[in-house]
Amino acid sequence: MYLRLDSRSRNSGQIRDRIVRTLFTGFMGLALLVSCRTLSAQEPNPGPGPIYGPHSPLGSRECTDCHKRAVSTTLRCLAAKTDLCEFCHQVPPEGGLAQQVRSSEPLCFKCHKRDQFKANYAHGPFIAGACVTCHDPHGGEVPGMLRIAGSQLCLDCHKDFSARFSNASFRHKAAVNNCLDCHSPHMSDQRHLLKSAPPGLCGKCHQGIIGDLQTAAVIHSPARETPSCMNCHDPHMAKEKSLLLADRLDSCLKCHDKPVKGAKEEFADMKKLLEANPYPHGPIQSRDCSTCHNPHSSSYSRLLTNQYAPGFYAPFFISNYSLCFRCHDAVLATEEHTTSTTEFRDGDRNLHYVHVSKASHGRTCRSCHEVHASSGQKHIAKTVPFGNWELPVQYEKTEDGGTCTPGCHTVQKYSRQQGKQ
């Protein structure tokens, strides 16, 4: 190839020189850009804040020089207290972030042997080895190195209970103060992780009730049958007094909605009796069976709170009627003549006194009255038990008195004004 150096060739040489210079400049710029980017890739991105180099392996005491916050507490884990940080932590030989020591089981069990805890029921975080859910692994100001004192620690997980607490009218003191008064935080042989079985567990606080259960002649079966106290009471909170699951009457009618066989007798279907009779006794009107019955145990038959003559006949003593005379004035049976104490009188002759105040065969209250509810006023029964016979009372009220034709005597009439029987 030949080049011609004429005027046209000289112009072409100038153009060529410009192209070479341009390419050289571009090549150098590209080389400089690549070099800058390479250097930039080798340097850390400063980002916000200061930059620190990798963590170098240190001894335990050197750890606490920086991590004083982790161990500056009153109650501390033994490892933290003695600066044995490497018992649980390790820094890689090449430096970098600290890691937990590798172990075939949760680190806590290096000291707290799992074999110490053997029971049928386990708390979820414990059995999963998530001890730090409840405990601070270094220490704290709360006994047991717990993260929070009292029941709030439990309520942080058991949020359904937290909502119920806020809406409840009555709260169990033990549940408010500390769940651990009744529950084991790790394992238990009792359901719900209870520390022991009721009623013994409840008896740690309610000693009088449990003491009576051990010595009383008559014991209410729900107090003995599993789950014992929880048959009637909520152990945490309730809308009813005494932490009852329902109001006092409804609590009783949960079981007494059918005939109930006792050790010596059968008790009536109380729900049916109350529904069929429109005149309830005062305690039934106030929906409080415990006015007359002890719900746990008693020294008297039928769990009565005081003496009530058990038969059709009884010699008259005030103490024989102490249950009734807690509300009713005893002069009903002690005054032979009255014009105000009772309407059951013939003139001023007190007919309660006539029936009751006898040295041997006085008629007891149950000889005429139904103590829960009746179809007529004054709780007068249609029939009353007399051995195997349902003795008819056959009482009829009049404007000024009444008429009785019971199975125990012939027809008798009385008038408060005429004084005639």
Image (cartoon, rainbow, N blue to C red):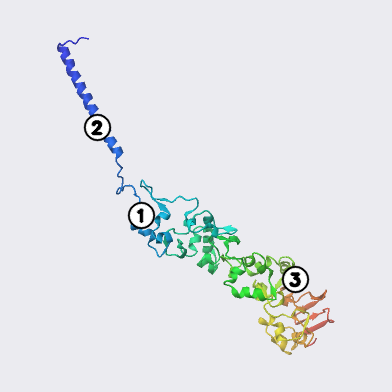
Residue most extreme to the left: 7
Which-is-in-front pick, marks 2 and 3?
2
Horizontal side of 28 relative to 352 (left or right) equals left
**Quadrant in the picture for residue 72:** bottom left
Query: What percent of the width, then of the height, locates residue 328?
Result: 68, 82
Q: Is residue 317 above or below residue 194?
A: below
User: Observer-nearest residue: 118 or 392?
Assistant: 118
Is mark 2 in CB contact (under 8 Å) with mark 3?
Answer: no
Horizontal side of 248 relative to 179 (left or right) equals right
- The CA span between labels 2 and 1 is 46 Å
Q: Which of marks 2 and 1 is nearer the N terminus?
A: 2
User: Observer-nearest residue: 282 or 59?
Assistant: 59
Q: Earlier in the sequence, mark 2 or mark 3?
A: 2
Query: What percent of the width, then of the height, locates residue 211?
Result: 63, 75
Horizontal side of 157 relative to 75 (left or right) equals right
Q: Is residue 87 above or below residue 267?
A: above
- The CA span between labels 2 and 3 is 105 Å
Quadrant (top left, top right, bottom left, bottom right) of the C terminus: bottom right
Q: Earlier in the sequence, mark 3 or mark 1?
A: 1
For residue 2, say whether it is visible: yes
Is mark 3 in CB contact (under 8 Å) with mark 1?
Answer: no
- The amino acid at mark 2 is Leu
Question: Looking at the rendered structure, which numbered label has been put on residue 32?
Answer: 2
Q: How crowded is mark 3: few (under 14 residues within 10 Å), some or many (20 or more)?
A: few
Question: Looking at the rendered structure, which numbered label has been put on residue 59?
Answer: 1
Horizontal side of 410 relative to 108 (left or right) equals right
Q: How crowded is mark 2: few (under 14 residues within 10 Å), some or many (20 or more)?
A: few
Q: Identify the residue position indicated by label 3 in the image.
A: 263
User: Observer-nearest residue: 220 or 310?
Assistant: 220
Q: What element carries label 2?
A: helix
